Image (cartoon, rainbow, N blue to C red):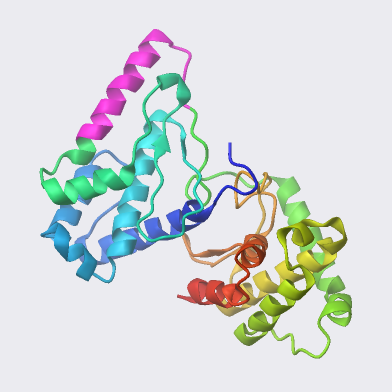
Amino acid sequence: MASKDDGDEWLIRLPERLEHLRDIGAREDELDLDFSLRSLPDLERYLTDRFEEPEVMDQDEDAEWIIEGAAAYVGEMLLRLAGGHWEPTDDPRPWHVPPIHADQALALPSLAPLDLVLTAVRDRTGDVFERQYADWTATVQAYRTAHPSWSPTKQPTPLVDPVPVVESEREYLARWLATREQSFPNWVARYGQGTTWDFSVASLAVLGALVLRVTPTLEAFHAPEQAEFVEGAAWYTGESLRRARNGHWTYRHGDPEVNPYGGQPYVRQQKDGGAAGLPHLALKTLVKRHDPQLLVDQYEAFMA
């Protein structure tokens, strides 16, 4: 189980990479990534057609998105088959895709989907993904035969696995948004006088510097006496994203120490699979990295 300081970098990148790969594949190759078994050889064919030689990957401006997206897709396919979860990681580097772990009942070793993708491009056999899927299928079927009441348990992947919204989540979000909007004038009077808070990207740069002045350390950021400041800053950050992209606020129950999309409101673009902005996590990361420009960077990524 992830701790508060375990990384969420991959779980944040994964839905965006997956959606980008779907967009590229549908536009360029009529590639339908619908999580069906037939989609695995189709995806592998697309990769080998696009990267005729492994060396050309570095010359393709979309390579990072495509390779990480393919690893995300293959990993999700295997997790839907055998249950399990992605390993937590805080490594933000491109092409850093963590391994997956199947349901522990299966006693399968961890598997690196990125290695499968690179092997498919390098070896060009056309059946790397199918063979791995078949291997895990055999293990799942054998275990199910021996334990008929068993079924694999998959840790939901945020923004990829559908989870119904419950009424208590809607109520929490409505209360939080109303409280934050009503209290924002007091927040400005206490923390932000002399600044034009117009939800612009320029104001996010000012907010980044303000956050480091008020909460220069993670200890200060998490201190109960700073909760009102942090909540106001999170609302303003998310509202800036929402207004820029005509997005919407979302809230799901959960523990943000385990799931970056749980327990704290965040913003989604309107379109299905659109980018997400996680203001609480962005603020915490800003303090952790001591980077006042991080909110601007998130804004630009959300707008891309």
x then y, percent, for residue 195: 76, 89
Residue sitting at x 63%, y 62%:
288
Residue 44 is one of the magenta-drawn residues: no
Residue in the picture at 67% in, 54% down:
251
Closer to the camera in the image, 238 or 123 = 123
In terms of depth relative to the viewer, which is nearer, 250 or 288? 288
Q: Which image quarter holds the N terminus?
A: top right
Vertical comparison of 232 with 194: above or below: above
**Range drawn in magenta:** 131-152
Please count the marks in the image.
0
Asked whether 147 falls inside the magenta stretch, the response is yes
Residue, x 30% and y 52% (percent of image)? 70
- Placement of 186 over or under 40, stated as above or below: below
The residue sitting at the top extreme is 146
Answer above or below: position of 242 versus 161: below
Question: Image quarter for residue 16?
Answer: bottom left
